Amino acid sequence: MNVISNHMPTADLQRLDAAHHMHPFTAGSELAEKGARVITSAKGVMLTDSDGHQILDAMSGLWCVNIGYGREELAEAAARQMRELPYYNTFFQTTHVPAIALSAKLAEIAPRDLNHVFYAGSGSEANDTNIRLVRHYWAQKGQPDRNIIISRTNAYHGSTLGGGSLGGMSGMQNQGVPVIPGIHHIDQPDWWSEGGDMSPHDFGLACARQLEDAIKQHGPDRVAAFIGEPVQGAGGVIVPPDSYWPEIQRICDDYGILLIADEVICGFGRTGHWFGSDYMGIRPDIMTIAKGLSSGYAPIGGSLVCDEVAQVVNDAGDFNHGYTYSGHPVACAVALENLRILQEERIVENVCNKIAPYLADKWTQLTDHPLVGEAKIVGMMGSIALTPDKAARAKFKADAGTVGLHCRGRCFDNGLVMRHVGDRMIIAPPLVITESEIDTLIDRAVQSLDETYDLIR
Ligand code: PLP
């Protein structure tokens, strides 16, 4: 067989890919028919594909490349660590310097007393850890029946059996999850789609109070934790009404249940603050982290844990849980270098003070387009709802998502990665995007919206 490389014709690469590579969240039949897009290199916010097209990546890969592509420092950190100590584990009372240094750094930047980290290879694994962690915690406190975890419909918390069970996405529900018992879902705070005649404020309160109803239904001594993303990402960048999170926090405090903030997307500057919890003013007991922790340059995730929970778990003897790659030294070294760049280049502050307001101004103007209902944006994560009737907040009659899917295709052909969730279009560009690149993003988005509108009217 020929050597497989970037120099092979695209069609040959696609044929091999379709023959041997099973892709996440992709229909195999479509791969065989159309082939996958082959991305060959990237720099800053721009991708290059195997046909030489330049595409502005307004999704930071999968919401993860916060510092942008092509940072040599991270490649060097990985190479240095691979030469010195490519692997050692953190089981059975062993450790290494990259894990020690990253843990100390995370304790420094995390809010409140989230001073402890349990490492995983991904966000899904970290959420699996969280299920076991909170149940183990309550069992050690003499409340083994306190094991119910409350999550939300349309939430995404990963694809492992635990993450998938915590999640509430309809597309996953009939494919082998949920399987973990004791997980209860309440409604998501999506005012645009589900708020009916209520004001956003009242709807936010009503959604939050479903948590209180669920706690009363199961019995307060049965509920271990609530899990939610500060801003739902994969669900469609659903920004909750301002009334929502303060009420959730009040309920967690009143009933003494643990609050888990899944910061896999929101963390590390995405909201214009270090963590989405800072932005929403919440005090989580546990945070799930991944993605922006290493800007996606190495697979790493983890659970940040507050003093009290960590102490109970640590005092209880072995926590019989862990992954071969928990605290992988190369991933830790890459994450440390990524955090150094985020801090030293003041990237989060620049997002908060300059870039996010610039993007928000342009993004919210998209509501002038005849196809766009609401436009929501927090920091560097935004969404627009495509609608046939803005005033009625109506959905398209055709299969949900058809218009969004079409728009995504137009975007790609116009040199822009913008993702669709049903008929919501979403963006989460690298935090280092410049104002002129934002202008390009918006121009390409408008062109794609125009073309989509022409097709459906
Ligand atoms: N939690 C949230 C909020 C996510 O968005 C994701 C992934 O998109 C995950 C968990 C799962 O992370 P991973 O894909 O690293 O397993």
Image: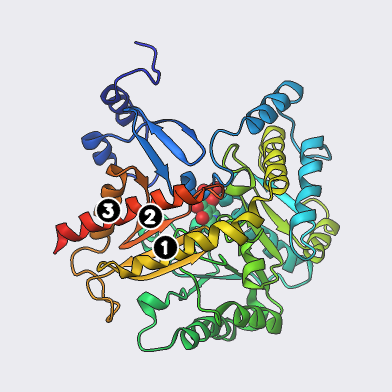
Rounded to the nearest angstrom, the CA distance separating label 1 from label 3 is 14 Å
Q: Is residue 129 left or right of residue 238?
A: right
Which residue in the structure is indicated by mark 2? 442
> Between 243 and 30, which is closer to the camera in this rendering?
243
Indicate whether 83 appears above or below 311.
above
Using a 10 Å C-alpha cutoff, classify the residue at mark 1 as few (fewer than 14 neighbours), some (14 to 19) or many (20 or more). many
> Amino acid under label 3?
Gln
Rounded to the nearest angstrom, the CA distance separating label 2 from label 1 is 7 Å
Proximity of marks 2 and 1: CB atoms separated by less than 8 Å: yes
Which residue in the structure is indicated by mark 3? 447
Indicate whether 143 appears above or below 59.
below
> Amino acid under label 2?
Ile
Residue 49 shows in the view: yes
Instruction: Specify which label sits upstream in the sequence, 2 or 1.
Output: 1
Residue at the spot 75% in from the left edge and 55% down from the top edge: 109
Residue at the spot 77% in from the left edge and 40% down from the top edge: 99
Q: Helix, strand or loop at disc 3? A: helix
Using a 10 Å C-alpha cutoff, classify the residue at mark 2 as few (fewer than 14 neighbours), some (14 to 19) or many (20 or more). some
